[in-house]
């Protein structure tokens, strides 16, 4: 029966223990095949010798060969003992072969080896890995006086099967039992890691804190695996301060500890901290970085728009020989796109071997936010030609490309093809893209009809897209309707009140516009302050509106003053309407001239040699006036300016912008 393994190797499932225990080593290379072991086998009739072989193969992840060895052993009439079964079960579990596992289980039973703690724990583990949780629990319940290993196997099993609550329930049960019997032996570092992994999946701060407290009392906090998982658990609850604290108090840290911290910051949008943690790691001599860390750092670089930093990581990747990793390649594509460097992104994309659906989607999405709709569609068709089927994420990128490039018909086509040709139901994001696409094209009624026909409940993003379109196309009635929905869905967001106020102002309805402003005040709503950043020689410089804190602010203002007459002669008329359009703190200043993006561009102008491209990141949308000014500046100074605002890229050059004045 087991001879089948000699020819077919099945896909391996990741071991839960390996994925849970962050401190475990990376996957080991495959050991020699069974035949080489077989040749060296001194005593073929000894179970002991066979056990060595099976355990060696299983330890090196060569599960198919381990099972083949088990089969040979049986064929030669050698009786397996209690040490044989755990490795055979492990092999079945890792390969997801529950039917083979059951037969081996039966054999163990017939040989009178059940229940044996050693065999039981491996069976619980095997059934859990094969997603047969009922059988795993039955075995656990039938094990008389289960020891720590059996308890842990069951807790890990629950986590592996995405049942974090049951995992924690069992963890607490084992804790209570240990207390009654006055022994803490049932709780070891492995079960602590499992409990914390369950916390990570639940993302509840209170529960994580509770388990952390228990582990502190048990003195398990000094284990490096426990510490690493704790960082992750706090990060998943969004409590980065506690994640950092957990990191700080660790007596011993490995590269995974640093990785956990960096990923925690990166995934929670705290890019600057992620980048500085990465630098700190290097300065402390920890140079071992995994693909996950490098991807996290590239992600942070992309968010912060720090091109120079991203480039450094790129050369590091090459130096470390990880340039072929598809995971990193995709992160590089994403980073270059988000830094507005499409050429570099495309190069990274072309160099990525074994491109997967994520790589293609990143490239399509990158072209989309940079307003290169045609290039995005070209890549999309190459992807389909390559035989890859687009997924949910790809379609978001495709629809957003159509939207940014105003490709209405193509957008309509792909929106319906999603379901009809690829069997993918359009989700909220796809609907939002379509509303944006139709809205931008001035087809407000069609956009509204699409929303009302939705089977899903439309969210704030969708109504927000319609509201923005109403501002551009000056549709007061539909604007009011969308805003009303938004006030219900997201009542604390000041931006929607300002948008509606802008719509009123644009239609000359000043009383209504003012009413909105009063409303904002009476509700005590505040917008996050607008700021722009620019990277210069590896340092990020941040400018707030009317900034007087930056050491070079005087020089920047002098430059802007000097620019004034040149702008006027180029035909510039201040767009005071933008004071209304601008939906951030900046409007309070009502001074267009000192908007943060102008300051950041001015700083770039005086600090970089002529011809250098100036890249600025703004946290909110660019206002109409700044957009006009930057277009003119690009012509006057003969410089390319790249501004990434909260929704897209603007590539300014020769007095024009890539967005075609539509954003
Ligand atoms: Zn502005
Ligand atoms: Zn633009």
Image (cartoon, rainbow, N blue to C red):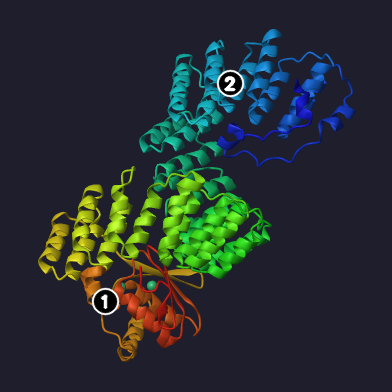
Decide which of 612, 447 is in the foreground and name it.
447
Name the quarter showing ligand 2.
Answer: bottom left
Q: Is residue 332 visible?
A: no
Above or below residue 612? Residue 12 is: above
Residue lying at 61% horizontally and 63% vertically, measured from the top left? 348
Decide which of 624, 420 is in the foreground and name it.
420
Q: Are marks 1 and 2 in contact (CB under 8 Å)?
A: no
Q: Position of residue 390 (x, y in %)?
A: 53, 50
Q: Position of residue 75 (x, y in %)?
A: 82, 17
With 511 as the anchor, is 173 left or right in this view? Answer: right
Decide which of 230, 271 is in the foreground and name it.
271
Query: Residue furthest toward the left?
Result: 511
- Quadrant location of the C terminus? bottom left
Badge 1 crowding class, 10 Å Cα cut-off, few under 14, some 14 to 19, many 20 or more, is: many
Tell which circle, 1 or 2, labels the residue nearer the N-terminal end: 2
The tag on residue 371 is none
Asked whether mark 1 lies closer than 8 Å to ligand 1, one says yes
With 339 as the anchor, is 60 left or right in this view? Answer: right
Residue lying at 47% horizontally and 32% vertically, measured from the top left? 198
Question: What is the secondary structure assignment of the residue under circle 1?
Answer: helix
Residues at marks 1 and 2, CA–CA distance in whole angstroms: 67 Å
Above or below residue 364? Residue 116 is: above
Question: What is the secondary structure assignment of the residue under circle 2?
Answer: helix
Residue lying at 48% horizontally and 51% vertically, measured from the top left? 393
Q: Position of residue 239 (x, y in %)?
A: 39, 45
Asked whether mark 2 lies closer than 8 Å to ligand 2, one says no
The tag on residue 592 is 1
Q: Position of residue 368 (x, y in %)?
A: 46, 63
Q: Is residue 244 visible?
A: yes
- Quadrant location of the N terminus? top right
The tag on residue 124 is 2
Badge 2 crowding class, 10 Å Cα cut-off, few under 14, some 14 to 19, many 20 or more, is: many
């Amino acid at each position: 029966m087991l001879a089948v393994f000699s020819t077919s190797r099945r896909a391996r499932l990741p071991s839960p223990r390996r994925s849970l225990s962050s401190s475990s080593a990376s996957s080991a290379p495959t050991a020699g095949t069974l035949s080489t072991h077989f040749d060296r086998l001194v005593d073929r009739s000894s179970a002991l010798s066979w056990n060595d072989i099976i355990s060696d193969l299983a330890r090196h992840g060569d599960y198919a060969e381990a099972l083949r060895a088990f089969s040979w052993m049986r064929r030669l009439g050698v009786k397996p003992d209690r040490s044989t079964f755990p490795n055979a079960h492990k092999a079945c579990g890792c390969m997801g072969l529950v039917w083979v596992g059951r037969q081996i289980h039966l054999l163990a039973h017939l040989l009178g080896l059940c229940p044996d703690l050693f065999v039981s724990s491996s069976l619980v583990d095997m059934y859990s890995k094969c997603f047969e949780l009922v059988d795993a629990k039955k075995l656990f319940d039938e094990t008389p006086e289960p020891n720590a290993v059996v308890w842990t196997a069951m807790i890990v099993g629950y986590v592996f099967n995405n049942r974090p609550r049951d995992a924690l329930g069992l963890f607490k049960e084992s804790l209570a039992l240990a207390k009654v019997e006055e022994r803490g032996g049932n709780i070891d570092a492995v079960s602590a890691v499992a409990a914390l992994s369950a916390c990570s999946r639940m993302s509840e701060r209170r529960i994580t804190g509770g388990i952390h407290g228990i582990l502190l009392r048990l003195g398990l906090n000094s284990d490096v695996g426990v510490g690493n998982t704790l960082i992750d658990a706090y990060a998943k609850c969004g409590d980065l301060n506690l994640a950092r604290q957990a990191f700080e108090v660790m007596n011993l840290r490995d590269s995974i500890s640093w990785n956990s911290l960096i990923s925690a910051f990166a995934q929670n949008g705290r890019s600057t901290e992620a980048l500085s943690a990465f630098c700190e790691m290097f300065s402390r001599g920890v140079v071992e970085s995994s693909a996950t860390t490098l991807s996290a750092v590239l992600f942070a670089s992309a968010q912060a728009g720090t091109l120079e930093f991203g480039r450094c990581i790129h050369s590091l990747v090459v130096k470390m020989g990880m340039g072929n990793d598809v995971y990193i390649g995709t992160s590089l594509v994403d980073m270059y796109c988000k830094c507005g460097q499409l050429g570099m992104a495309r190069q990274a994309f072309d160099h990525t071997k074994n491109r997967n659906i994520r790589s293609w989607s990143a490239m399509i999405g990158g072209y989309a936010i940079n307003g290169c709709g045609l290039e995005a569609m070209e890549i999309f068709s190459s992807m389909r030609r390559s035989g890859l089927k687009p997924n949910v994420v790809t379609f978001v990128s495709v629809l957003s490309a159509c939207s940014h490039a105003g490709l209405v018909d193509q957008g309509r086509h792909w929106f319906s093809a999603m379901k009809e040709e690829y069997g993918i139901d359009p989700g909220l994001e796809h609907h939002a893209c379509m509303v944006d696409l139709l809205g931008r094209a001035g087809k407000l009624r069609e956009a509204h009809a699409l929303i009302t026909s939705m089977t899903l409940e439309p969210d704030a993003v969708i109504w927000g897209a319609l509201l923005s379109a109403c501002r551009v196309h000056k549709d007061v009635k539909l604007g009011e309707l969308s805003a009303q929905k938004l006030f219900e869905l997201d009542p604390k967001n000041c931006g929607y009140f300002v948008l509606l106020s802008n719509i009123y102002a644009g239609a000359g309805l000043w009383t209504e516009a003012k009413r909105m402003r009063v409303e904002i005040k009476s509700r005590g709503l505040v917008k996050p302050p607008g700021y722009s950043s620019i990277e210069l020689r590896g340092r990020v410089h941040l400018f707030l509106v009317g900034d007087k804190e930056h050491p070079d602010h005087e020089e920047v203002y002098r430059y802007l003053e000097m620019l004034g007459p040149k702008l006027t002669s180029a035909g510039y008329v201040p767009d005071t309407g933008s004071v209304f359009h601008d939906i951030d703190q900046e409007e309070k200043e009502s001074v267009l001239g000192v908007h943060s993006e102008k300051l950041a561009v001015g700083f770039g102008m005086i600090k970089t040699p002529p011809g250098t491209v100036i890249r600025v990141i703004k946290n909110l949308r660019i206002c109409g006036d700044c957009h006009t000014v930057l277009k003119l500046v690009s012509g006057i100074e003969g410089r390319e300016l790249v501004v990434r605002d909260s929704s897209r890229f603007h590539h300014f050059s020769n007095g024009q912008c890539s967005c075609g004045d539509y954003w």
